[in-house]
Amino acid sequence: MGRLTYFRSAETIAESLRMALGAYTAVPGREAEQGLYRGIHDMWGYAYFAIQNADGQQWNDLSQEILATLKATEQRPGVEPRIVVQAAARLIARFEHMAGVTLKTAPVSPFLSL
């Protein structure tokens, strides 16, 4: 039987999340915040799928960091945008590295500032 695959590719998730981060960086309003949150949640879904389907523990630390970021942003509405941007950029960079995503655009800098 063939190897299971997630319904969206890591490249698609990473690119979508990078666009959501760009929108949030430009205008950190409610709509952009929700887009960023959805993208991070999608990234967590991919990591969880990887843990459950033989890629195992190498994804565990990343999935825990993703969950912690989601929880922190849910519990602290109005978190300073710079902190959100830095956390999301770190997650995206780690996700791309773990998934072996080849960048087609400039890498996201975890040191972005607003």
Image (spheres, grey):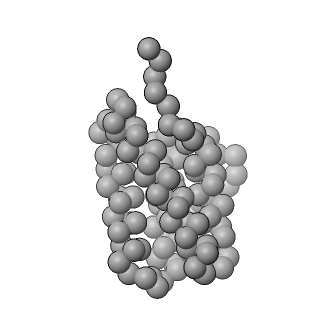
User: Residue 84: where, in percent of width, then height?
Assistant: 48, 73
Tell me what residue is drawn at x 46 percent, y 76 percent.
83
Q: Is residue 75 above or below residue 98?
A: below
User: Residue 24: where, in percent of width, then height?
Assistant: 61, 73
Q: Is residue 100 left or right of residue 61?
A: right
Task: Tell which of 23 and 49 is nearer to you.
Answer: 49
Q: Is residue 110 visible?
A: no
The quadrant where residue 70 appears: bottom left
Q: Is residue 25 left or right of residue 3?
A: right
User: Residue 111: where, in percent of width, then height?
Assistant: 53, 69
Q: Is residue 43 above or below residue 49?
A: below
Q: Is residue 54 visible?
A: yes
Q: Is residue 9 left or right of residue 66?
A: right
Q: In the orientation shown, which residue stands out farthest toward the top?
A: 1
Q: Is residue 17 above or below residue 34?
A: above
User: Residue 46: where, in percent of width, then height?
Assistant: 46, 44
Q: Quadrant of the C terminus?
A: bottom right
Q: Quadrant of the N terminus?
A: top left
Tell me what residue is drawn at x 35 percent, y 29 percent.
54
Tell me what residue is drawn at x 61 percent, y 73 percent.
32
The quadrant where residue 33 appears: bottom right
Tell me what residue is drawn at x 59 percent, y 57 percent.
17
Task: Tell which of 81 and 70 is nearer to you.
Answer: 70
Q: Is residue 10 above or below residue 68?
A: above
Q: Is residue 47 left or right of residue 17?
A: left
Q: In the orientation shown, which residue stands out farthest toward the right?
A: 105
